[in-house]
Every structure is written in structure tokens, then in C-alpha cells.
Amino acid sequence: MRVTGRQVDGLMIVVFVTAAVCLFSFFSVRMARDDVSIAHGDSRDGSVVVKLSADSGQGGIYYLPAKTTLPELFNIAGVKHQDRFDQNMIARPLITGQTITVETHARLILGQMNAAERLALGLAIDLNRATVEELMLIDGIGESTATGIVHFRETSGPLKKVSDLTKISGIKEKKLKRWERFFYLPP
């Protein structure tokens, strides 16, 4: 078999392109920084997780240091004209799971994330306020168990501790251990 000059030229081009791709891959990986992180995306313990909704597009989920206030969040998010809001209202520290909605006409609405948002972010839900549908979002809790939890809560009053769930028929220690990270009880 005889190799022609055009075949040699084609082979050389393939070799050079392959070498260029390999070199580019090698150096781009070497130059990539491992310490790159999302600003205010650190979910370490002690951080406050809030949801900001704003008409001007600064919305999102923010992981902030404990005791962060609304003015500090607004500075981070670039929300302007903070003086239009009630200063007593915005001076309090933010709470994990809080939602802040900034509307264009100087209206500020504070609320709480819904259960689906909280669970998606790895946050616990309030066991004494969760509905049947919200409880069913947790892996391993079906409709009958969720209904049992809500019924127990309605007949016995608010739960004092998460371990009170074992008083419900069908919930034993093993299930409780699996679920307890999904629940909190406010003080």
C-alpha cells in the first residue's frame, strides 16, 4: 500500500489538531481555580438562607452570615433607594426561610418560603404547621402517614418535640431517625 502526499498532509493536520486540543485541555484544567465560589452561595452551618424577589431583577436565594439585616442584603443585591422602607421593619436580623419581596412602589413584603422551597434547599419545615401535601413531599411519608401526623396534631395539640411522632401508629424510631432532619419546631 502506497501513501500519497495528500494523505500525509491530512494525517499531519489530524495530529496537529489533536495535539492542540490535548494541550488546550491540559492547560485549561491547570489554570482553573478550585477556590471559585458563588457569591453568597455558601450553605455552611450558621448561615441564614433567604429568598429575595424584586421587580428590578435582583432576586434569588442568598446564603448570608448570621445576624445579617435587610439593608445589608439590599446592599449585596444592589437594591437601591432603601430609605423608602420603614426603617424599624428592616433593622431586624433576617431569619432562615424568610422571603423578602420588594415591589416598585415602595412596598416591602416579608413572608416565609413554602415547604417545597425549604426542602429543595435542604431546610427543615415547621412540623406544627405542615399540611398533608407538604408532609408528603418528604421521602417515605405517604398520604396515610401525613394524614395521621396532621390528625394527631389536631387532636393532641402542637407537638413539643419531634420525637412525639413516635406516639403515632406506624411511626417507630427508625422512621423518626430518617425524617427528623426535615422538621423543626419553633420556640
Image (tube, rainbow, N blue to C red):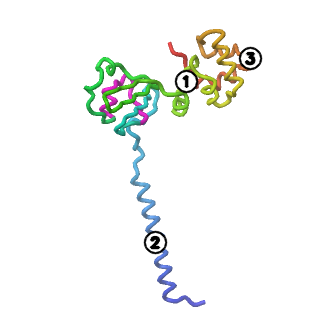
Residue corresponding to mark 3:
169
Residue 133 in picture, x, y percent from top left:
62, 27
Against 1, residue 168 (above or below) is above
Is 110 included in the stretch rendered in magenta? no
Q: Callout 3: helix, strand or loop?
A: loop
Q: Callout 2: helix, strand or loop?
A: helix
Q: Residue furthest front?
A: 105
Does the residue at mark 1 contact the one at mark 3 (Cβ under 8 Å)? no
Q: Locate residue 169 relative to residue 8 in the image: left or right.
A: right
Q: Residue at x 53, y 31 (%)?
A: 122
Q: Locate residue 86 relative to residue 12 in the image: left or right.
A: left
Mark 3 Cα-neighbour bin, 10 Å: few <14, some 14–19, many ≥20:
few
Residue corresponding to mark 1:
125
Residue corresponding to mark 2:
17
Residue 16 in picture, x, y percent from top left:
45, 73
Give the residue type at disc 2: Val
Is 65 included in the stretch rendered in magenta? yes
Q: Callout 1: helix, strand or loop?
A: strand
Boundaries of the magenta span:
60-76
Does the residue at mark 1 contact the one at mark 2 (Cβ under 8 Å)? no
Q: Residue at x 69, y 16 (%)?
A: 166
Give the residue type at disc 1: Ile
Quarter of the figure that contains the N terminus: bottom right
**Separation of residues labelled 3 and 2 (CA atoms):** 68 Å
Give the residue type at disc 3: Ser
In the rendered structure, which disc, 1 or 3, sits on the residue that comes first in sequence? 1
Q: Residue at x 33, y 19 (%)?
A: 89
Residue 156 in picture, x, y percent from top left:
65, 9
The answer to which of 92 and 28 lies nearer the viewer is 92
Residue 112 in picture, x, y percent from top left:
47, 24
Q: Please identify, in this view, whether the residue under mark 3 or under mark 2 is nearer the observer.
A: 3
**Separation of residues labelled 1 and 3 (CA atoms):** 22 Å
